[in-house]
Amino acid sequence: MSEDILHQLKNTLIFGGLTDEALADVAHKATKRRLSKGNILMRKGEEGDSLFLIHKGWMKIVTEDSKGGELIINRCGPGETIGEMALLDQGTRSATVIALEDSDVLELKKDVFEKILDERPDVSLSIIRSYSDRLRFSTTYIERAIDWAQKIAEGDYSFVEHTQPAMNKNASDDDKATQLLSAFFTMVNRVKEREEGLKQQLEKLTFEIDQARRKQEFEEITSTEFYAQLKEQARALRQKRHQG
């Protein structure tokens, strides 16, 4: 196993506390997998029997929205571990993971992972810290989505111009949440466009109604006996002037 893999294991939050000997053992028991861009590492709903350490490349963690469209909920890169949740709660995969570029990952099977936990209780604490970091990010993600939803309800779209998602891999939780809410931005723009279209239709309809109302009022006035008398008097005056 190469030195760079050992170095990366040592710098992960979960395995960073292991001795060099233990790290070498983990590296020896891990299986290296290579994925091309677009390859699926795991699917939502599958049984989880291993965790993965991203050695090279970036992955997107996705689920589906109500219409079956892709909804990105996170991105992970070198040094990050994914898939351990299914090992800990004995459940199925909670999301699908897809390679954003050509990538290398290390796969650690369930029995090896459980043995490490038995021998090194401090690894459990590292896992708790890892989940704590993800929970903090999830909280930021949810807060941002709720804040924007409230602004949309009030008809305020100013945040779209000031918080456009810029794809930056080295970003804070706040910036990362903005990046991952790209689908939200698409939805906001559609809502805004639809609202502007409705306003234009309303203005056109209002103009047409006003035109029709004025025409009706004119017809009502010109059809009265009073208007007919005024018209006859005006005709008589013109005739009198012409004769004079």
Image (spheres, rainbow, N blue to C red):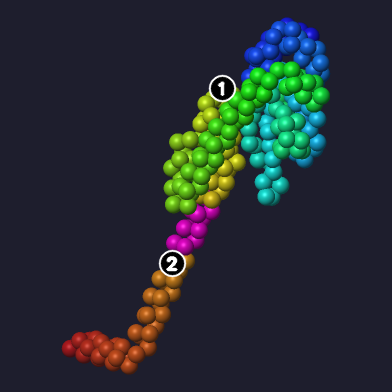
The residue depicted at 45 percent of the width and 40 percent of the height is 159
Residue under numbered circle 2: 206
- Between residue 8 and residue 223, name the one nearer to us: 8
Q: Where, by quadrant of the figure, is residue 133 drawn?
A: top right
The residue depicted at 60 percent of the width and 41 percent of the height is 183
Q: Is residue 232 left or right of residue 41?
A: left
Magenta-drawn segment: 193-203
Q: Quadrant of the C terminus?
A: bottom left
Residue 226 in the image: above or below residue 150? below
Q: CA distance from mark 2 to mark 1?
A: 51 Å
* Amino acid identity at mark 2: Thr
From the top left corner, tell me how far across and down residue 62 is, in percent: 68, 37
Residue 147, numbered circle: none
- Between residue 27 and residue 181, name the one nearer to us: 27
Q: Is residue 150 visible?
A: yes
Q: Where, by quadrant of the figure, is residue 7 drawn?
A: top right
Q: Quadrant of the N terminus?
A: top right
Residue under numbered circle 1: 170
Q: Residues within 10 Å of mark 1 (few under 14, many from 20)?
A: few
- Between residue 96 and residue 206, name the one nearer to us: 96
Q: Residues within 10 Å of mark 2 (few under 14, many from 20)?
A: few
> Is 199 included in the stretch rendered in magenta?
yes
> Is 134 included in the stretch rendered in magenta?
no
Q: Main secondary structure of the magenta part?
A: helix
Q: Nearer the viewer, mark 2 or mark 1?
A: 1
From the top left corner, tell me how far across and down residue 203 is, in percent: 44, 62
Instruction: Tell me the SS state at disc 2.
Output: helix
- Between residue 218 and residue 64, name the one nearer to us: 64
Q: Earlier in the sequence, mark 2 or mark 1?
A: 1
